[in-house]
Image: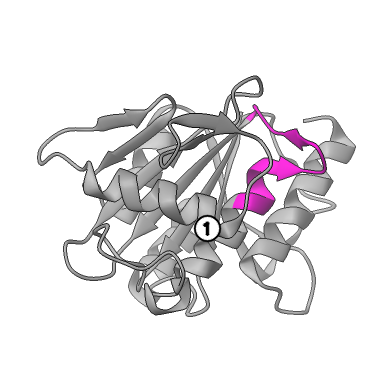
Amino acid sequence: MRHFIYFSGQARTSGNFDVKNLMKAGRMDIAIHSFINALFFSHGVREDVKFHFVFYGAPDPPKHIEIQVNKEEGLPEPEKGVQRIDISKKDVGSLLKKILYKYKKGEKNEVFQGCFIEKRSFLKVIEDLMNEGKSIFILDKKGEDIRKAKIPKDSVFIFGDQEGLPRKEFKRLKKMVNSVSIGPKMYFASQTITIVNNELDKRGL
């Protein structure tokens, strides 16, 4: 199982945002692009990927949303009560909106099959995965070349939004986890995820 953790310091932590204007929802559009590139490819969906959104925006941070898509059913479509594999940013935005509205204080709530929400901090999400024995990798220009790095089958990759990861947490993570680089250029989070997926695909992981 591949895990992708996407951190956003601005993305809304309640469902009161307009899916037609995702940029004004704390750049929710970037989070959604990253999600789509992590789990979907041409005419298909990755069942071996679990995606973690960690949102720290207003009004009620932090929120941890965990999604794994079933190949046969596709992505839940809240507006129509059905599942689908061909998706758009608006589809994912509607799903996140519904999940955020269904948050229940003090519990990890499964809103749809494979879609969970809870209040959990960025570092706590990572620590929980470490305690499960998973190898954790953070994307960093100064890290080891991902094409040379030893990557186990059950690994976790951490990405930040357009502002990157919080400075304090980033420094702490550098001491806790492995740093890998996809090259000297800075890419969008969604592009970086595609490159990581491609590398793991080539290795058969």
Q: Is residue 138 visible?
A: no
Residue under label 1, please give it. Answer: 90
Q: Quadrant of residue 203?
A: top right
Q: Residue at x 65, y 28 (%)?
A: 48
Up/down of 42 relative to 9, above or below: above
Estimate the x, y position of residue 138 in percent, counting from the top left: 57, 57
Number of marks drawn = 1
> As rendered, which of 110 and 16 lies closer to the eye?
16
Up/down of 161 relative to 99, above or below: below
Q: Residue at x 77, y 30 (%)?
A: 205
Estimate the x, y position of residue 127 in percent, counting from the top left: 36, 42
Give the residue type that dot 1 points to: Lys
Estimate the x, y position of residue 168 in percent, counting from the top left: 34, 73
Which element carries disc 1, helix, strand or loop? helix
Q: Is residue 30 left or right of residue 203?
A: left
Quadrant in which the N terminus is drawn: top right
> As rendered, which of 186 and 27 lies closer to the eye?
27
Protein image colouring: one colour
Magenta stretch, residue numbers: 36-48
